[in-house]
Every structure is written in C-alpha cells, then in structure tokens.
Image (spheres, rainbow, N blue to C red):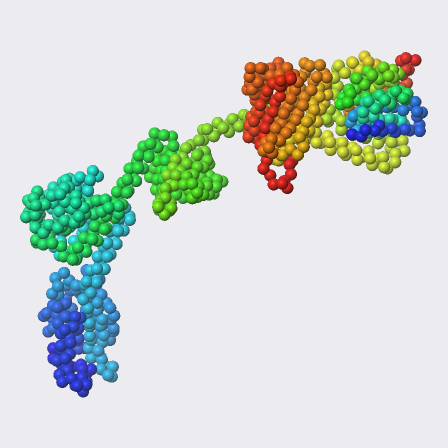
Amino acid sequence: MGDRAICMTSSEKSDTEIICLVDDDLSILKSIERLLASDGFSVCAFNKPKEFLTYVQAHAVPLVVLDIWMEEMSGLELQAQLSELSPNTRVIIMTGREGATSRSTTADMGASAFFTKPFDDEQFLCAVHSALEERPRNV
Amino acid sequence: MSEATNLDRERSLPAQGFDDTNEIVHSILSNMGDAVIVTDKEGKFLVFNRAAQRMFGADTAQLTLTEWSDRQSLYLPDKVTPFSLDELPLAGALRGEKTNNAEIFVRGGDISTGLWIRVNARPLSNADGKLLGGMMVCRDISEIKEEEFFRAGQSRVLEMIAADKPLGEVLTNLVLLMEGQAEGLRCSILLLSRDGKHVRHGAAPNLSEIYVRAVDGAPIGPYNGSCGTAMFTRRPVVVTDVMTDPLWANYRDLARISGLSACWSTPILSPQGEVLGSFAMYREEKRGPVAEENRLTEIATHIAGIAIERQRQQEILREREARISLAAESADVAFWILYPEQNRAWMSEKGRLMYGFDSKLPLTCELILSRIHPDERARVKETYDRSCTLHGTFESEHRLLLPYGKIRWVIMRGRCLKDEHGNLLETIGVTLDVSAQKQADLQLQVQREEMGHRNRVSLMGEMTASFAHELNQPLTAIANNASAARRFLERGNIDSTLLQQLLQDMVADSQRAGEVIRGIRSLVRKEKGARALLDLNAVISDTIRLLSSDVLMRESVVTPDLEDNLPPVEAVPVQIQQVLLNLIMNSLDAVEALPPNERRIIVSTRSIDGQTVEVSVRDFGAGLPGDNPEKVFDHFFSTKQQGMGMGLAIVRSIVESHDGTITAENVRDGGARFFFRLPSARIHPKSQAA
C-alpha cells in the first residue's frame, strides 16, 4: 500500500468542500474517491489513519468517510480521536461487515451515516450531501 | 554250385592268370560272412553261398525263387508283415530294379530267434544290357539291430520316468527290457524300505508269485540272500550256486521251487550314494555273470536309480505339499509353490478358493499370474523378478481379479529356492486375503476425509467475517468505479485516460474477487487434491491474510515470524491451510478472554538442519490443561463451550498423513504453543516450490 495520501480536487467546489477519505484498502480508496469526484467533490484520501489525524490538525475537514476495520487503527478509535481533534468534522462510516454494535456505537458517537459495503452510489452521495448540509454541532 | 561259373564276368578271369576261376569264386563265396544269392532270369538259383544257407536254411539251393519265397519267412521291420514274392529284392532285381539297404527280419533259418538282415539287390545283365538274372547280398545286422532296440527300450523307460508313470510300471518295463537281452535271463528289482532295514518288492515279472511274496519285507543283513546282502554291504554280491552259498541258507527251498540256481545282485545307489534298492539277475544254471550281463546290470542299476530317486523326490514333494496343505487349511492363507522351470504350480485348497481355481485344474505359473489385476500385473511380476534375484524373497500387496469380476486385496509373500549354481528351482509362499481389512481402511479413509471436509466447512462458518470482507472489498470497488464512470459519462467530462484506469481497476478487482471465491471453493471441495511442493511461508501469509478481518474484529494481532529461505515441503495445499486455520482459530479463541492489547498470536517457521521444517503457532492465553497438554489432540476433547473437539484431532491426522509430527506444550512465560514438523522435500535445485 502506498504511504502517501491521494488528493483529488475539483474546481466546482470550494476548499472547504474537500472531503477526506480513510481506508487502508487502496482499491476501495481509489474507487470512492472517483465516485465523489464524479459528483464534483474534491477528495483527499488517506490509507493510513494516523496521517489523516495529522492532516486534520492543520486543515478544516467538513466531512470524513471512514472504514471501520483497518489494521493501523480501527475506524471507531479514529472517530473517537477525531471528535477530540476536530469536533466539527462530520463522519460517514463504512464497513465490510455490518455488526449491530458498530452501527449503534458509531451513531452514538455522532456519525452522520453508516454504510455496509458494497453500497448504493446514489444513497451514498445523498448521505454525503446531507452530511455537508448539516450544521456543525458546535457552532 | 558249378552253375555259378556261367557268369560272363568270371569267364574273363583265366585270361588274367587264374587257373581255376570256378574254384576261386567258390572259395570266396563260401568264406564270405554276407549271404550271396544269384538266380537266372527264371528265378533258378545259381549261387546260394554258405552264409545264405546259414541265414535261410540249408535245403533251399535246389528250389526256384518262387518256391523259396513260399517257404521262407521274411518279414517287414515290424516283424509281423510277411514279404510277398513281388516285394522280394531279388524279384525286383529280375525286373531290372535295384534295392539298397532294405532291412528285413528273417525267421526259419538256422538261428531260432530269427535275425535281421540288410539287403542289397542288383539285376545282372550282359555287355549288351540284356538281363541275365539277379543278385542279392544280405548282411546279418542282428547285433546292431538288437543294440538299437535295446537303446530304444532304455529311452522308453526313461520317458516313462519323465512322464511320472508309477514306479512299479517303470521298473517292470526295465526288468523286461533287460530280460529280453539274454536267453534264459530273469531279473528283479527290490527296493530298500524307508527305515533302511527291509527289502520291498519292486519288479519281478518273471519270478514266481511265491518267491516275490516271500522276499517282500525280508530284512537286509550280511547273510540275507544276494539282494539283502548287496543292500546291506552296498557292494555287488555274486552267488554262483544258491544251493551251497551260505548267503542263501534261508532261501534254498524258495530257490528250488522257483528253479533258480545262481543269482547276482548289485545295489542301486542314489547320486548322493544312498542305497535305494538292488537289481538282481537269476539263472537256472550255476554260474557267475558274463561280461554282457555285467554291462546290462550297470545300465539297469543306473536307470532304476533315476526312477527310484525321482519317485522318492516326488513323494517328499507330495508329503511336503500335504503338510503345507494341512497347515494352510487350518490358517486363513493360501499356500503355493511355483516351479518356473517346469511351468507348474501347486496351491492349497484354500488358495484355490481364494484365487478362484477349480480343485482339479492343473496350475501353471502363468495361470496364477493371470489372476492378478491387469493394472498391477506388470508391477507385481517386476517386483517378483527383481526381489527374487536380489534378495531371494519378495512381498507384494495387490488386487486379484477373479472370474465374474470379483476383486480381492491380498498380500503375497514368497521365498525363492535356488540350486548351487543360483538357478531358481521353486518359489514357495503364502497369500493372505486382506480384503476385509482393506475395506475397513478405505472406509476409515472416507470417514477421515468426510471429517476433514466437515471441519473445513465449519471453519468457514467461523470465518464468514473474513470471507465477507475479502469479497466485499473488490465488489465495493467495482461498484464504485462503475458508478463513477456512469456519472462522469452523464456529465460528459471524462477523459479517456481516467476511463481506462477505471476499467482496468474494475478488471483487477473482479479478478481479486474471483481469487477469493476460488479459495473458498478449494476449502469446501470434498476431494483433498494432490500433493505439491509448498512454500510454508507463503501458505502462512495467505492464511493470515484470509483471516485478517476476523483477527481485526476480534481485536487480536497475528504476527508472522518467518525464516527466510525455508526449504519447501511436499504436501496437499488445502490440508496444510486447514491445519494452519485450525491452529490460528484455536489460538484466537484462546486469547479471546484477554484485554485487546494482549490478544497476540505469533506464527513462526524455522528449518531444522535443512531436513525438517517446523511451524509454530503460539498464543498468550491461559494455556493447555497442565496434566496432559497432548490430550487436546484426542477426538471430542474440547475446552471450549461450542467446540466439537474435532479440529485438533483432524490437525494431527493431517500432519501425520504427511509423515510429520505435532506437539502441544505450555510456554513458561504464559500461553500455549503448537508446533508441527514436516519433512522437507528432496528436490532438484531447479524445481520451484508452489
């Protein structure tokens, strides 16, 4: 797996509209990034959760799409740390296996949406749009 | 005989200086050993010399050929078909025909037993070629013929021996042959009893019944007639007068009744020098043997020795076969003996049943070989030939294919017996029917495979998270890429490079999904597959990857610690993966109760002297039951609530079926360690591990 984050920006959306993506599976990472780009979003993709945590401390991130099961750090742990570092960042969770615990836990922790792979592209993009339209909780 | 001078040729003799040609010719003809007979063309005898008179009778000279032929007894070589006048060589000569070396048997001459003559006949003619008469020259070839018949008689007896005719019949024929060689000769053959102390009747066709019965069973000893003494002393015994000789003291009355006056006997010895019996000649006159009789004795004892020795060998063989048979019938095995030289074989009754041979069928080596399953026949034959040459013994496990298609599994063991020159005499052996055992083995194997399969299916049930994840990843990527492509196209702003990348990724991801499905299929497939060269490090990495989702979900860590350049092993890939899955899943269960950061498992490999590869799966859990960690490999042993207790038992059976060993132990600083060792494959350096 590559170490560097991949960022794809689009002229249609402002910088504040850059969506972050964290998944340690490169092919998933690339495909979601393309899906978001096809809807005009700029994307900054990370395959290492810690690199995203570093990034989030220096940049305003309105929305992050996270995978739960990652080797370096689980999505839940990342979500917990993110809520400390960037409480305004909305979170969409993805998982390869739906478990009742993770769905409710992530909801409790304030996740905007929860998707089990593979998911419907319309629903996913819809959720991305709604999450971005949500008011930041702490504003 | 004056007529003999009428021949034209002799008329020229005076001119060459002979005074009385007639006298000279007469003298030559009279002193010739060959019979010379000359007739004129009417068949009137002109010459009938002394030898002719001796052969055909003295009073024939005054007869014509026709009259003579009526009185003469001339026979064809069969001794019974008379010659007709026309067939007589002399008659032929009068017709202008030549006869060369015709053999004729003659009765009615001076020699009462008849005689054999060789006849040459020629027509006689003058210088102008005019037929004057015929001439016949006869040579007495009785001695040559008798020797010829005697030899033929010996050959007949030897043939009888070779054909395994009953000994009594063979010996009687031998005695008759000998008796036929001399006038007034009677012979007998006696056998030495098994205990070596008595004589037994062998053959005496021309001795009285009383004599034969009296002698049968008599003891041998230093004064026991000619035969009993000859057998006892192992030397020829000559009694020229049975009435006075002390050896015959007990048999004089018998000799008188039988009309015997002299008897000489010679012991019959085996090639090893053992006394087998005696050959005796009896005469009605008091005398010892003449040279011809000694020659006959020598021949007779030699042939009788062969016959008796062979019969004894056959008897020993039959007794041995009977003994083996007895042993064989009480055991559940087939006994057999192959005699490859004679292409003959013997098999116990149970063996015949096992091989499906009728009890009367004469057996050959080929016939027994033909019962071996065609798929295995060549292999068994090769093993037999090679083992017999190299070790003198052989063993083979194979199938028999019986008539009507019945199959039997057997183990055949044999020992080859050779003579002092190393020639194979016979192979003796046993065949065990192991069909029932084989059936049970096969059933057990099927059960084992079934169990192994169930274990894999059950493992898969436990690994659904991994499989779902492994499949979901590529499927999600494909779906996302396809959606993205559709959107880009709808918006009309996609460049062809991006589209190409999208499509390439979709292909790669669908292949990745295919690999996952293939992996699942190989695990649930019933047949175990073939052995291949395996790099255990690669199998371990694949297995850990396969389990990664489950490991993540269980918040555990599986760390590989793999030695570089590990020698490959020869194994069934799916079975080795099954072993690893069982051991790792087992360890994952063992660490479940621990806090997440302590849920560690280490999978390591190492090579031991390049001969063995060791794979170890170590956890940091509560450890194995202290008293006997090895108990975990027993069937139905489980420390887990839901466990069937089959996993580790199957692991052990798989490892052992790969000639490996597996051990479970508690580690001093906590947790348990399972390690299995497999022999590394002996391979050519160029071969590559799978």
Task: Out of B501 and B106, give the one closest to the viewer.
Answer: B501
Residue found at x 11% / y 65%: B110
Relative to the observer, which residue lies in front, B416 or B212?
B416
Name the spot of residue A132 as percent of width and height, x first: 89, 19
Residue drawn at the location 60% of the way across and 18% of the way down: B666
Q: Give the total of numbered labels.
A: 0
Would residue A50 be seen by someone viewing this image from the given angle? Answer: yes
Q: Quadrant of the C terminus of chain B?
A: top right
Q: Tell me: residue B310, above or below residue B496.
A: below
Q: Position of residue B467 (x, y in %)?
A: 70, 25
Q: Is B512 positioned to the left or the right of B231 in the image? A: right
Q: Quadrant of residue B315?
A: top left
**Residue at 14%, 40% in the rendered image:** B219
Residue at (89% x, 13% y) in the render: A137
**Residue B399: % across, % down:** 46, 36
Q: Quick check: B98 above or below B268?
A: below
Work out which quarter of the rendered image holds the N terminus of chain B and state it.
bottom left
Q: Quadrant of residue A127?
A: top right
Q: Is residue B352 visible?
A: no
Left or right of B588? Residue A121 is right
Residue B446's x, y, as percent? 54, 27
**Residue furthest to the bottom:** B15
Name the one closer to the observer, B489 or B52: B52
Q: Is residue A25 left or right of residue B81?
A: right
Q: Nearer the viewer, residue B516 or B593?
A: B593
Residue B296 sits in quarter? bottom left
